Amino acid sequence: MEQLHKKYADRDVQCVCIYVREPHPGERAFRQYQRHSSFDHRVRYAKELVQLKAMNVPVIVDGLDEAVHKALGNLPNLAYVVDKQGKVVYKATWTNAEHIDELLSELTSEGDPSPRLPVTIRDAEVGTAI
Amino acid sequence: MSRMMENNFRRNPWGPLFGLWSAQYLDLWKLVRLKLNPQIKATYQRFPSVLPPGSTFPDLTLPTVEGGTFRTADYRGKKHLVLFTGSIT
């Protein structure tokens, strides 16, 4: 998604990562990450995510009640594309950069002059899904 | 666009080795329990009907990690938005 963000930065596209609950707190490779106990705790983890993944995509933080996440479907790795008119044009249970790239090239250029993202870019760059 | 719609109904991919690779960093039994959890299944089944393609995306206002405020309304008529959820684990 980082490469997607870079690719479309100057083409009227804004990528945004919504930091939500940790789906696997305390599990094998994530022993140091616990369930969020407060909003500050959540913001701290969100900042850590930005550092860990060297993210340039803006990260916004959902509240502890997960109100926004629930309104969007409550899945750990979901994605939405919303056009300039504010209409949902794409949604997925699993963030897939290739599919989004395809859609954005249609939305932005009607004849995309730049190359597609390489196939190796997968959705799991940010977070891990259940 | 029809292929995009198709993706709405796709479950999370299992990944290599039918998902067993996840056991390297996740609690395998918890993973199995999650996969079998009827509430999780219901969440996936409900997902296509939540804000389906063509519907108006709600105005969201959330804080950014830098301390600012992000409003989807600020982008209306100006930019396409790609929103995806993320977490460390």
Image (tube, helix red, strand yellow):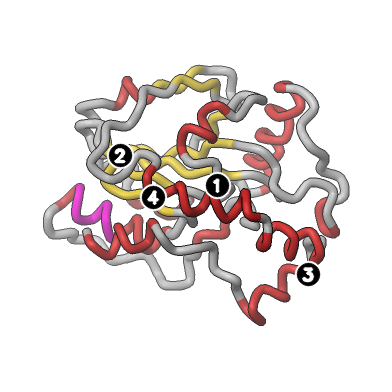
Check disc 2 and report its element: helix, strand or loop.
Answer: strand
Magenta stretch, overall SS: helix
Q: Which mark is residue A75?
A: 1
Magenta stretch contains residue A106: yes
Count of numbered marks: 4
Q: Nearer the viewer, mark 4 or mark 2?
A: 4
Q: Amino acid at mark 4?
A: Pro
Q: Residue at x 19, y 55 (%)?
A: A106
Badge 4 is on which residue? Answer: B48
Q: Could you tell me the amino acid type at mark 2?
A: Val
Instruction: Please tell me in which quadrant of the rendered image residue A60 appears.
Output: top right
Marking on residue B23? 3
Q: Say above or below: A104 vs A22.
A: below
Image check: A113 left or right of B36? left
> x, y percentage for residue A29?
82, 58
Q: Amino acid at mark 1?
A: Leu
Q: Which circle, 1 or 4, is nearer the viewer? A: 4
Calculate the distance from the C-alpha at mark 1 to the C-alpha at mark 2. Answer: 18 Å
- Disc 2/disc 3 C-alpha distance (Å): 35 Å
Question: Dot 4 lies on which element?
Answer: helix
Q: Position of residue A18 (x, y in %)?
A: 53, 36
Residue A102 in the image, given as x and y percentages of width and height = 28, 60
Given contact means CB atoms under 8 Å apart, are the residues at marks 1 and 2 in contact? Answer: no
Stretch in magenta: A102-107
The residues bearing labels 4 and 2 have C-alpha atoms spaced at a distance of 16 Å
Q: Quadrant of residue A14?
A: top left
Q: Residue at x 32, y 47 (%)?
A: A8
Residue with the mark numbered 2 = A82
The chain identifier of the residue carrying mark 2 reads A
| A87 relative position to A119: left or right | left
Estimate the spatial distance between the alpha carbons at disc 1 and disc 4, rounded to whole Å: 12 Å
